[in-house]
Amino acid sequence: MTDPQDASARLAGLAVDRAVLADRLVQPRWWDVTLGLLLFGFVSSCSAHRTWVIVAAAVLLFAGIAVLKAVYQRITGTWWDARTVGPVQEQVRRAMRWWLVGYLTVLVLGCAAEYLLDVPGAMVVAGAVLGLTAALLSRWVTRAYVAGLRAGR
Amino acid sequence: MTAVVPQFDGVIHPPPRLQICGLLAAVDSMEFAAVRDTVGVSDSVLSKHVKQLEEAGYVRVGKATIASRQRTSLSLTKPGRAAFAAHVAELRRITAGLDGG
């Protein structure tokens, strides 16, 4: 067992370690930009109206995400999913749910405009909106996660 | 959400192991080198403590070869996460006694 002073020192040590960990978790800005561009590329490829272009963009999206994951692990030495580990799980799950609702809404509106109303480039606009929000969401999740770690939650 | 029952854990408590678990509890996985640098111990000391945590079923060691270099990653198992949460709850319970005088 342990005495109160020792327990207090151990908890303080854990808080210091988490603050140090928080410092190394923040990805460079180009990481979020690349993620947004990959999603933009995929969604806007639907404006091409060619199956092979859309399939190629989907392959590029998944390959790009795999590379981004590997690069993040290489840079930070860690991997984490804020929905399942860490101090802000519920907050991130809620934000992801809202983003998904918005994502599907924009996607449906974009598809309707592009394919039903014959508005050329509608999916490019939808892709820009979704790519931008994905990049911002990625940044926000990291900030919330890091802030939670620093706050000792 | 289920409440964590405070429980002292003698495997987790010694300083390097508590630090290791504290780091791994905050992420899905962390590379051996990153844990070593953050905890501030040598490879051999970290290996020894990781082995003890692994034998207790608290830590999982993964190895992957990327670009002809072997990379070792560490992660907490589900029982490891539960034991760490219970141990921290116990430390907080003990410290609450300190606050209350």
Image (spheres, rainbow, N blue to C red):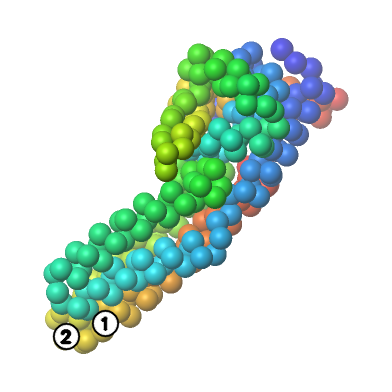
**Residue A52 placement, left or right of B44:** left
Residue at the extreme front of the image, as rendered: B68
Residue at 45% in and 57% down:
A95
User: Disc 1 and disc 2: Cα gap in Å?
Assistant: 10 Å
**Where, by quadrant of the figure, is residue B24 drawn?**
top right
Residue A6 is marked as none
Residue A149 image position (x, y, % from top left): 63, 45
Q: Height in image: A133 above or below A122?
A: above
Name the one closer to the observer, A130 or A20.
A20
Q: Amino acid at mark 1?
A: Ala
SS at circle 2: loop
Q: Are marks 1 and 2 in contact (CB under 8 Å)?
A: yes
Residue A151 image position (x, y, % from top left): 68, 47
Name the one closer to the observer, A73 or B56.
A73
Q: Height in image: B43 above or below A106?
A: above
Residue annotated with mark 1 = A122
Q: Height in image: A94 above or below B34?
A: below
In primary-sequence order, the first of circles 1 and 2 is 2
Which chain is disc 1 placed on? A
